[in-house]
Structure formats: C-alpha cells, structure tokens
Amino acid sequence: MKIKRWLRHLATGQLALRFCFSKTALNAIEQAIRQSETQHGGEICFAVEIALNAVPLFKNQSARERAIDVFSQLRVWDTEHNNGVLIYVLLADRDVEIVADRGINAKISESEWEAVCHAMESAFRQRQFETGVIDGIQTIGRHLATHFPPDENKSRNELPNKPVVL
C-alpha cells in the first residue's frame, strides 16, 4: 500500500475532472467516437474515472486491473463481432489503459496498444487532455479500419458514444 497513491486518490475530485475533461471536451470526445465509427466496423468506448475508492486502493488494484473490470461492467465485450475497445483513463494516476475484445486483440499487438496509451499520457502531461483522447480515438480508428472495414449492413451502434464518467 503506497501512501502517496492513497493521498493522490483522496485529493483528486470533481474539480480535476472538470479541469481535464470539461463538458465541451466530453462532447468533442463523443463526436470523435461517432465520427471514427463511420470509418470502421468496430466499437469504441471511452471511460474516465476520477479516483479509486478505498477497497481497490487497499488491494492495490492497478489501473490495468480496474480497466478490465470496467470493460466487463460496461459490457464492451458484448459486441456482435467481438470488436469493442475500451479507452480507460484513471485521472488520479494519470494512467491510460486500452482493453480490446478478443476479435481485435487477435489482430493488433499489445505494443501497438501501448504506443497509443503512451501518446495519450504524453499529451496529458502537457495538459492536452481533449487532444490526447481524440488523437487516441483516431489512431484506434485507423487500426480498426484495417481489420474491421465499415459494414454498410450494420444497423445499430452497439456501445454508447457518450463518454462514461465513473
């Protein structure tokens, strides 16, 4: 159990969320997801969590482990073609994780996902939160377009485009 991490999570609140992801930024992210999904047959979900509560912190849950939990809770895995991707941001840790369903993970390497995460984290260090997420969405969209071209018969959006704030 790391005291610095506990303090960071306790100190990070709604103000940090509003500073990093204003309503305007969240709307722009939603539009970026909507636009991206016109270019491929995949599904992108963006979730931002301000901080972990006491139980996961006590268990020293990593951002990656939490992202996998959120992937399940938001049912990103439940797409028809197993082509859902979750972009998860844990604000208190300034950590980005990408969790992709098995249909995508079989085609895109872990190092490619890590490169997207690192690029987003780099933008965050420069306080370019909206730009970092939108660039990440566009990069993921290019990967998805390569392996899941647009499907004209696709009649519904399987995952919400609206960012999820946890």
Image (cartoon, grey):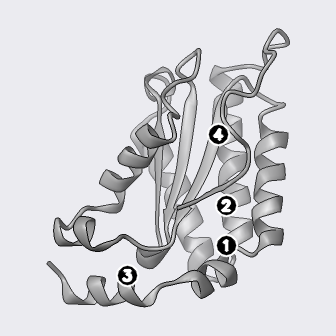
Q: Who's the residue at 44% across and 78% down the image?
A: 92
Mark 2: which secondary structure? helix
Q: Compared to 35, does 48 lie above or below?
A: below
Label 2 belongs to which residue? 133
N-terminal-most mark, 4 or 2: 4
Q: Point out the frontmost of discs 2 and 3.
A: 3
Marks 1 and 2 sit apart, C-alpha to C-alpha, by 6 Å
Judge left or right: residue 18 versus residue 16: right
Checking the image for residue 9, the label placed there is 3
Do the residues under discs 1 and 3 have CB atoms within 8 angstroms? no
Task: Report the number of numbered marks.
Answer: 4
Label 4 belongs to which residue? 44
- Relative image position of residue 67 (x, y in whole percent): 41, 51
Where residue 127 sits, quadrant-wise, is bottom right
Identity, as a three-letter code, of the amino acid under mark 3: His
Judge left or right: residue 8 versus residue 16: left
Marks 4 and 2 sit apart, C-alpha to C-alpha, by 12 Å
